[in-house]
Amino acid sequence: MILIGVFIVGALIAVLLFSGIIPGFNKSNSTFAGNVVIWGSIPQNQVSTFINEFKNTNKDKYSISYIYKNPATLAEDLVGTLARGSGPDLVFISDSDIYPLRDFIEPISYSRLPIRDFRNVFIEGSEIFTNNQGVIALPLSVDPLVLYYNRDSYTKKSILQAPQTWSEYILNHQKLTTVDNNSFISSSGTAFGEFSNVPNAKEILIALIMQVGGSFTTLSTEGIYKSGLNGSSNHSSILSAIDFFTHFSMSGKAEYSWNKSLPNAKSAFSSGFLANYFGFASELKDLQTRNPNLNLDVTNLPQVSLTTRPLTYGHFTGIAILRSSRNKNTAISVAFDLANKTNAAKISELSKLPPARRDLLVLETSDPFLDTFYQSAIFAKSWVDPNPNLSKIVFSNLINVVVTRTMSTEQAFIRMISEFGSLF
């Protein structure tokens, strides 16, 4: 009986060790102690108060150091630092960092965070941070693509409601656009069909294609990301989405309202020339600063009529653990603490973006802008971009040859599939 008891205790300890409940006997990760270095994209002056509060709350468990990094170069800076044998333990990453950092991130195993628990806590779009190995990053915030519109322009044309579908949007667009017989545009309802002067052209086009069922990236059973455009069953719908986007920049088309000679779309919207601007929630402050007198409002991205579920594009931010961390067990503990309900709410407030947690998105807000951002966040989706800069060129080339009528939409799309596939 004594031997049986010893075996039972031994088996129990083995199970707890395997599950991560007991951290193990390795001295380097036997306790949640030591300093954890975090890289993030929230400016130091904005996050310092939160970091200090977080340090004080958890000072008996561990200490942390936060280092700000430019989000545009974060992935590149991190890879270079890791190559030199140094680097942080944790990093705030966006969905665009998943592919370039895939070999440097330590997924949280599903034995430690079951996929069912993940889905219960975080919104569906957050699953961009999961793969067949585990959770790539714990989701923190969402930056959804929305429609900003000029209330004065709408009132002037007796438009009483913001559009919910693209069909409604086109009707409004026709009222808001003025083009003479020489194709001169004196007022515009929509800035589509160009990349050089439309800040979010890539994301808008992706959202349109995703709304009709298009998929850009798939994950194989071996954990390899591949292009999802090959052999798409939604081929004709994708072509229609591309045509919809390009017709606004093709003179002679009924939707014509934009061209490359016009100013940047954000500037055109701020000046009152452009009635609608498709931008992200994170752009609100900039829009308000550019023209404090602009009577703007916001609504969800219009949807395809009779859609089974709404969808918009969104950028997701999460906290990830690096394989190279010398204090991995503590880093995981810090990551879970940062993503809990209390701290996720504080991070959301700092970034002025909707949280990725379901229990925070159900909370009521009196801010009309934030209320719309919360709604859009719930149905936001993203994708694993193999190379954000090069893929933008691929999408830009696609649109350019269609607008200039160098290729048919189908020819351009077939070429684009090949160019896009080579990025993986």
Image (cartoon, rainbow, N blue to C red):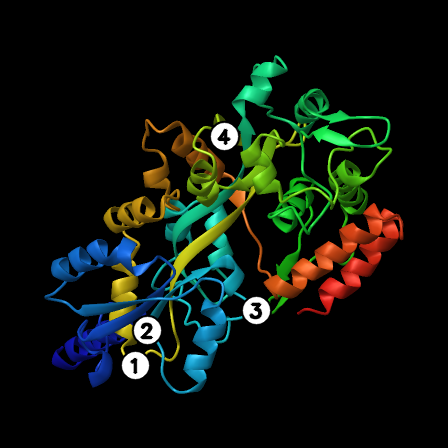
Residue bearing mark 2? 89
Identity of the residue drawn at 31% across and 73% down: 18
Identity of the residue drawn at 23% across and 79% down: 29
Q: How far across and how far down the image is residue 262, in percent?
A: 70, 42
Residue bearing mark 4? 298
Q: Nearer the viewer, mark 4 or mark 1?
A: 4
69 versus 185 height, above or below: below
Q: How far across and how far down the image is residue 401, in percent?
A: 83, 53
Identity of the residue drawn at 54% across and 35% down: 270
Question: 19 or 89: nearer the eye?
Answer: 89
SS type, badge 2: loop
Residue farthest to the bottom, as pictured: 84
Q: Earlier in the sequence, mark 3 or mark 4?
A: 3
Q: Nearer the viewer, mark 3 or mark 4?
A: 4
Q: How far across and how far down the image is residue 304, in percent?
A: 67, 32
Q: Real-space Cα distance between discs 3 and 4?
A: 39 Å
SS type, badge 4: strand
Q: Nearer the viewer, mark 3 or mark 1?
A: 1
Q: Real-space Cα distance between discs 2 and 3?
A: 23 Å
Q: Nearer the viewer, mark 2 or mark 4?
A: 4
Q: Are marks 3 and 4 in contact (CB under 8 Å)?
A: no
Please identify the quarter of the rendering in which residue 321 is found: bottom left
Q: Are marks 4 and 1 in contact (CB under 8 Å)?
A: no
Which numbered dot is residue 118?
none
Q: In which quadrant is the C terminus drawn?
A: bottom right
From the viewer's perspective, tell me whether residue 395 is left or right of residue 406. left
Please identify the quarter of the rendering in which residue 414 is found: bottom right
> Crowdedness of circle 2 by 10 Å Cα count: few (<14), some, many (20+)?
many
Q: Are marks 2 and 1 in contact (CB under 8 Å)?
A: yes
Residue bearing mark 3? 223
From the viewer's perspective, tell me whether residue 204 is left or right of residue 360. right
